[in-house]
Every structure is written in C-alpha cells, then in structure tokens.
Image: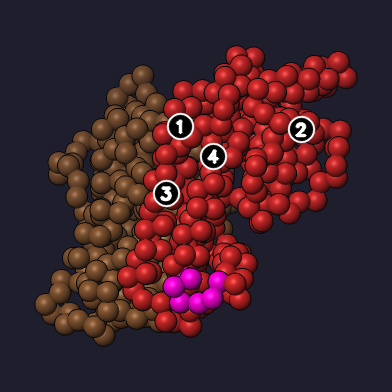
Chain colours: A brown, B red
Amino acid sequence: MHEIRLVGFDGDDTLWRSEDYYRTAEKQYEDIVGRYIDLHDAGTLRHLLEVERRNLKVFGYGVKGMTLSMIEAAIELTGGRIGARDLQQVVEIGRATLQHPVELLDGIRDAVADIAAELPVVLITKGDLFHQEAKIARSGLADLFPRIEIVSEKDPQTYARVLGELGIEAAQFVMVGNSLRSDIEPVVRLGGWGVHIPYAITWAHEAEHGLAEAHPRVRSVESPRQLPAAVREIVTGVRNAR
Amino acid sequence: MHEIRLVGFDGDDTLWRSEDYYRTAEKQYEDIVGRYIDLHDAGTLRHLLEVERRNLKVFGYGVKGMTLSMIEAAIELTGGRIGARDLQQVVEIGRATLQHPVELLDGIRDAVADIAAELPVVLITKGDLFHQEAKIARSGLADLFPRIEIVSEKDPQTYARVLGELGIEAAQFVMVGNSLRSDIEPVVRLGGWGVHIPYAITWAHEAEHGLAEAHPRVRSVESPRQLPAAVREIVTGVRNAR
C-alpha cells in the first residue's frame, strides 16, 4: 500500500525565471549575426536550435553548451565572415546569462515552505552543475531543501536512481515542474505523480512530450499558490485508495 | 571510537588519464594562436591559465569552460585578428577533448575491485556533470561504484556534505586521489585520511596546496597496485588505535 513520502521540485521556470534569460540571449545573438546576414531569410534561431540539438549529446544542457553552439552557429551562418570581436560578444552573452540574478516566481517560497511543513522535499534540477549550484545559492531557497540533486538528464532512469538512493518508491513520489517532458512524463512512466505548473514560455526542445491529456496521476495548476492544495489532493487521494 | 567505513576515489588522473588530453588541447591551441603571434614572446599558456582562472568563478571547471576561455584568450592575444575559421577550430578542440576515449590507469580496476571487496567505495569526481557521467560510462568502472558523486568543487564543505548524506564521519573515511589540493588536503582538514597517488603531470591550478609533507593521516603510493595495501594499512592502524 502506498503513501506519498516525498515531493520533488524542478528549479528552472518552476522556482525561478530561467527561460526569459535564454530568450534574451537568443535576441542578442540574433542582433550580432544580423550584422552579417539578412535575418528575414536566415531562420537564425531555427538554425541555432539545430546546432544546439546536434551538440546536446557532446555538450549537454546549460549555458556553456549554448554559448559554444552560438559561436559555432554564427560562424556557420556567416560563412566564416563574422569577426573575432563579435564572437567575443557571443562569449559575453554566455557570461551574462550565467550571472543573471535569480528571480523567484511570485508566491513560490511560501508554496514550498507550506508543502515542506508536511512532507520531505527535494530539489531535482537539470543542467550545468556549477551554474545550478550558483542559482540555488542566489535563490535563497537552499534552506528549504535539505537535499538537492543536480542531474544531466531527466529521464525515467535518472529519477529511478535518485529515488533509489533516497529509498522512495515512484508511487510514493510527487514531482512538481513546468516541463511535461522533463518533470512530469518520466515520473508518471515510473508510476509516480506529477503536478504540472506551466511557465509562460517553453524551449522548443522541452515542448516535445508523449503524455496524454488529463492523465489520472497528473494535476495542473496555474500559479504557485495553488501548489499546496494540488499536492494535498494527491496525498489524500493516495491515502484513501489504500 | 573509529573504524574506516568508506573509501572514496577521485576520477580524473586517479582512475583514468585526463590531464594528458588537456595538455594536447593546449598544444593545439598554441598552434592555432601561433598563426597570428610569435609564441616565443607571448607566454601563450601562462596567459591562457590567467584567463581560465579569472573565469573559474563563472564557468567552473571542465572542458566547456576551458574552451570558452581559449576562445576569449585567443581573441585577446591576437588583438581581435584571429579569424572565425580558426576560432571554430578552437571549438573543435573542446569537442575532441569532451569525446576522448577513457583510458584506465594500469592496474586500477583490480585495485578498486580489491578494496571494494572489503569496504564500501564511492567515486567523488569534480567537474562538468555531463562530461564526467560520459567518462564514467565509457570507463567501464560504473559497476564497481554503487554510488557516484559529481561535485563542482572539492573543498572541506563539499566533502562534509557528501559524507553527511552517506552517514559517515570524516575519521571513518579514506580518500584516494592524485591531487593534494582537491583530494587529500580537504579530507585531512576534516579529520579524514588520504592516499595520495601522484599522476605524471598536474595542472598548475591543482599543484597549489597547503599540506605539510608526511602528514600522519596521509599515505603515498606510486602505482595503483600499491593502493590496496595502503588502504589496508590505514584500516588496521585505525582499528588498533581504538
């Protein structure tokens, strides 16, 4: 028989703004490349996404990989005409993105504290170890999370490993996050629960998922303030089903 | 009273060759920059180390940070004259370094297996999460390590956190590694034990440490074959001191 014993939270775009900074970075990248080519013809950002995707298996996720992909994409798209000073500006885009302030989503601190008062919580975040640690420190939320897991990919295998190390079965676990692909689908596939809290914008790569609408083990909320009730509803449902 | 309950192993240059690939990368970087400047006058690699060090707090350790630093250093050193195609070659240095084969040090598999037959072991490795995971997978050693910790910095605080999560006191822990700065000194500062196994070459940044010669809780060995005896000597010494 099961009981919910752990609630996981994603970091980027669940606890704090992230995608906005990537979008700003892309805009700045377009401006630099636009000094050499006609942006209307070029499909600049579609090309960048292609370069990022083919590099994912070597660079992994994160800002440094994005920056290296931007440099490569800019050289490709300009036929090698882009100047070194402009490429240095692309490096500066990366540096600025790594150092952006961490802005918590409105109401998220109270929501996490509320849930953490009733159940153990864990932060499970994907991407660059160094950057994620810096963001957690800057977020001021580290005190709420006794345990933090930074992973390179959010697939069922990774969640199974993390839950195994913590001695928790998937059916006892609720994951809260903005990405159906990374936060909800893999946990549901393992037999766990999900609370989906969509963010205003989603990276094209994260928008792809194979989850049916209205899955019985998934709840959706619109704002952090609705999170505690959604988690409580799952906890109660699981308890009553025993 | 204490008993040794866990043995930690570093990855890079302790289990597998790593620094060699960084040195190759630096040599290739010099060749590219040498197309623009007189290498004899330039202190090219000293300049690169300076750029890497000032970037460490933003980029962290690892190949992607090194590659971004190389791009920045090459632009700086050539006064912006370096061409985009040559900068693409710097990106390729990074890509090749991330994909290098993993060559185990001679005898290390048997040494780890020998120690793991008597005591729990953990791999504690520093650097880029994605690259370290790829190397562990390619090393074929994952089966020997039920637990793997990839950390962004190896300081006393990090070791204390990892040991805390594993429920082990520092005095019950032996760390095996090639870097006095990263593997031995911080563990000894916490009250733990170290087995130092120097690698043929050391990155200048890692060569700095504050450990006295012949510390009573540190053993030194010259080859992986001597590791099991060195660990056993510590285990026995601790047991007899009770």
The three-letter amino acid code for the residue at tag 2 is Ser
Q: Residue at x 17, y 42 (%)?
A: A210
- Label 3 sits on residue: B98
The three-letter amino acid code for the residue at tag 1 is Ser
Vertical side of B116 occupied by A48: above or below:
below
Q: Which picture quadrant has residue A186?
A: top left
Q: Are marks 1 and 3 in contact (CB under 8 Å)?
A: no
Percent x, y of residue B104: 52, 31
The three-letter amino acid code for the residue at tag 4 is Arg
**Badge 4 or badge 1: first in the primary sequence:** 4
Residue B27 counted in the magenta span: no
Look at the numbered disc 4 and give the secondary structure of its residue. loop
Q: Identify the residue at the far left of this view.
A: A41
Q: Chain of mark 4?
A: B
Q: Are marks 3 and 2 in contact (CB under 8 Å)?
A: no
Callout 4: few (<14), some (14-19), or many (20+) C-alpha neighbours within 10 Å?
Answer: some
Q: Which residues are drawn in magenta?
A: B33-39
Callout 2: few (<14), some (14-19), or many (20+) C-alpha neighbours within 10 Å?
Answer: some
- Label 1 sits on residue: B139
Q: Residue at x 33, y 58 (%)?
A: A223
Q: Chain of mark 2?
A: B
**Badge 1 or badge 3: first in the primary sequence:** 3
Camera sees residue A223: yes
- Label 2 sits on residue: B220
CA gap, disc 4 and disc 1 = 10 Å
Look at the numbered disc 3 and give the secondary structure of its residue. helix
Q: Which picture quadrant has residue B151?
A: top right
- Label 4 sits on residue: B17
